[in-house]
Every structure is written in structure tokens, then in C-alpha cells.
Image: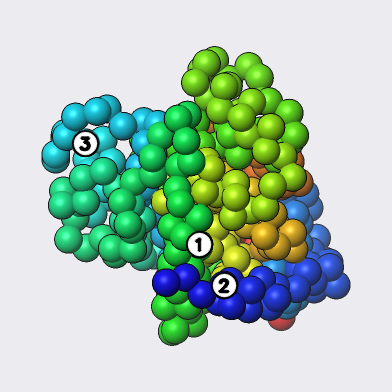
């Protein structure tokens, strides 16, 4: 059973990022004469509430979750795209795994609710209750499953923080996430996002716009995937403990939209790694986030967020001198 007190406790614990600490961290890197470094220092210092941000204790969380709208209609077994991508991360052959090793960042692979859970690597943390339903024909999730996904993300963040945590980077795997992101962006904007080049996604965006003003739980149940809820809960719990979260692509952006509706101050704890593809640039603009890299990278499995870590480390080192 879901306990709404857990979510409420976390939301109530989220305070605004510290403008004073962010500005102090910025001033400590002004000698580098780089606006990007100053912007990152401001974000890190404000989120961590310190003029000397830390990045040593970090993790990359990749949430796998499949959406019913992208279900191929047949069992693909080990050939399912989500399973293939998850194994590439687990066996170290994926670009994300190679970048993570270079950045000394452990990867936590989470099965938030996949179509072929038996085919995922044994190392995956099992949090899911299955994939979402087809959002074009009805609610993607039940309200109970949406709430449980948020709570699972909170529990995951608490577990990761047991040994101390300075920084999180997040990514996502799964089919159909682009359609969900369009629907959630439509709800956030109060208008259908256009120019997506995908009639299914644009129709979903129009449905999302029609639900503008609904509660975060209603929006998550209507349009979200299992990974959307887990990632949103993770972001909320991170914000409640002053841990910044580095976003990757549109699936992480969709989760950020849900987190922002639940707790507007949570956006002060988010860092956008790159412009992304599909809906992501518009999601970032709505959230008021400026990407580290002005380019789009892949589908958001975490590679872009991992690529931002060395630069974030450099900013932390500059701000901690002396």
C-alpha cells in the first residue's frame, strides 16, 4: 500500500536552493573567466548549500521502464530493445559504461517496470510493477502504481545516500517514453507541443494540454511510465537532502516536470547536461534550465549526463581551492 505521508514528508523537506551559497561558489571560480563554469558553480553551490561544492560521492542511476504506447504487441524476449540496452550497460560495452568508468561513477541500473523483466541483467535493482498501459487509449498507470513509483524512487535515493552522496546523474531506457514526454510537456505548457514530426506524440501532447492544471499524481497516472515516477521520486528525495541531479534526455526531463509540479523548489536542484532531442529542449526551457552542452545526445540513457561529470568536477575543484 502507498503511504502519502512519505511523499508529503519529502516534499515538505525541500527548501529553495541557496542563492547566497550559489553566488559565493560562483565568485570562487570567476578567475577562470568562463560563464559556463560560473553558471555550474552557482547551480552546485546553491543546491548543496555551500560555497565549496563536492562531487566525490556520486552515482549514475539509469531507470528502465517501458510504455504501453510503444509496445510492439509481441514478446521479443532477449531481443527487446530495452533488454539489449540494459545488457550493454551491465557488460560494459555501452558508451555510458565506458564514460562512467573514466569518471569513476558507479552505475545503478534499475528495472522500474519493463516489458521483459526476466531478460534484464541480474544486477538490475527490481523496483517495478510492470510496464505502463497505452496512454492513447486510457490512463498509463493507476493512481496507486503512480504513487508507488514515486515512493520507490524516494526509497532508492535514501538507500544511495546511506554512505553519503554529493551528486546524482540520471538516465532512462525504454520504448514509448517520447510520447509520454510530449503529453507531459503539453500539460506543463497548457498547449499542444507542435513540430514534433510524430502524429502519435502530437496527439498525446494535445491530450496533455487538455489536462493542464491537474495534480502531479493525476498527470503521472495519465501519461507517465514507471520510470517517470521512479525518477521523479528520486529527484524529490535528492532535493530534500541538498543533492543536485544531472538530467540527460527527454525521459528524465519528463520526470523533472512531475517533480516540479509536486515541489516547485526541486528545479533548483536540477542541472541539464545537454539540449537533448525531441521534446527535451522545450522541457528545459519550461523549467528554466540552461544545458551544459548546447547539443543533443542520443536518447538519454545517461551518456550525456555522465559526459558532464568531468566538467562539474572541475568546477567543484576550482570552488574548493584555498
Q: Are marks 1 and 2 in contact (CB under 8 Å)?
A: yes
Q: Residues within 10 Å of mark 1 (few under 14, many from 20)?
A: many
- Could you say which is closer to the camera, residue 262 or residue 311? 262
State the residue position of label 1: 147
- Name the side, left or right, on which 313 lies relative to 126: right
**Residue 204 occupies quadrant:** top right
Query: Residue beneath label 3, please?
Result: 80
Cα distance between the residues tagged 1 and 3: 27 Å
State yes or no: discs 3 and 2 in contact (Cβ < 8 Å). Answer: no
Question: At x 28% / y 63%, what residue is drawn?
Answer: 126
Q: In what element is the residue under mark 1?
A: helix
On the image, the x and y values in percent for residue 72 come to 27, 27
**Taking 44 as reference, is 283 above or below it?**
above
Q: Nearer the viewer, mark 3 or mark 2?
A: 2
| Quadrant hosting residue 186 | top right
Q: Which residue is mark 2?
A: 4
Residue beneath the point at 75% across and 34% down: 190
Q: Earlier in the sequence, mark 1 or mark 3?
A: 3
Amino acid at each position: 500500500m502507498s503511504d502519502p505521508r512519505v511523499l508529503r514528508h519529502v516534499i515538505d523537506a525541500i527548501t529553495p536552493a541557496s542563492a547566497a551559497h550559489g553566488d559565493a561558489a560562483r565568485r570562487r571560480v570567476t578567475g577562470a573567466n568562463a560563464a559556463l563554469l560560473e553558471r555550474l558553480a552557482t547551480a552546485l553551490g546553491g543546491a548543496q548549500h555551500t560555497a565549496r561544492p563536492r562531487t566525490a560521492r556520486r552515482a549514475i542511476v539509469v531507470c528502465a521502464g517501458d510504455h504501453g504506447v510503444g509496445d510492439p504487441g509481441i514478446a521479443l524476449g532477449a531481443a527487446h530493445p530495452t533488454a539489449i540496452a540494459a545488457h550493454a550497460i551491465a557488460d560494459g560495452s555501452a558508451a555510458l559504461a565506458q564514460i562512467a568508468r573514466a569518471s569513476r561513477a558507479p552505475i545503478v541500473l534499475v528495472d522500474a517496470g519493463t516489458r521483459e523483466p526476466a531478460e534484464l541483467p541480474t544486477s538490475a535493482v527490481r523496483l517495478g510493477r510492470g510496464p505502463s498501459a497505452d496512454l492513447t487509449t486510457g490512463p498509463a498507470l493507476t493512481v496507486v502504481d503512480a504513487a508507488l513509483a514515486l515512493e520507490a524512487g524516494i526509497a532508492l535515493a535514501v538507500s544511495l545516500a546511506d554512505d553519503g552522496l554529493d551528486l546524482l546523474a540520471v538516465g532512462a531506457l525504454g520504448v514509448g517514453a517520447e510520447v509520454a514526454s510530449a503529453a507531459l510537456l503539453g500539460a506543463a505548457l497548457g498547449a499542444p507541443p507542435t513540430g514534433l514530426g510524430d502524429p502519435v506524440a502530437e496527439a498525446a501532447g494535445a491530450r496533455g494540454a487538455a489536462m493542464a492544471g491537474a495534480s502531479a499524481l493525476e498527470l503521472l497516472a495519465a501519461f507517465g511510465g514507471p520510470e517517470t515516477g521512479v525518477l521523479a521520486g528520486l529527484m524529490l528525495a535528492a532535493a530534500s537532502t541538498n543533492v543536485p541531479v544531472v538530467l540527460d534526455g527527454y525521459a528524465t526531463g519528463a520526470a523533472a516536470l512531475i517533480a516540479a509540479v509536486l515541489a516547485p523548489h526541486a528545479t533548483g536542484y536540477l542541472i541539464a547536461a545537454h539540449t537533448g532531442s525531441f521534446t527535451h529542449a522545450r522541457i528545459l526551457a519550461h523549467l528554466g534550465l540552461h544545458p551544459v552542452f548546447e547539443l543533443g545526445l542520443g536518447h538519454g540513457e545517461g551518456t550525456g549526463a555522465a559526459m558532464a561529470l568531468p566538467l562539474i568536477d572541475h568546477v567543484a575543484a576550482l570552488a574548493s581551492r584555498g
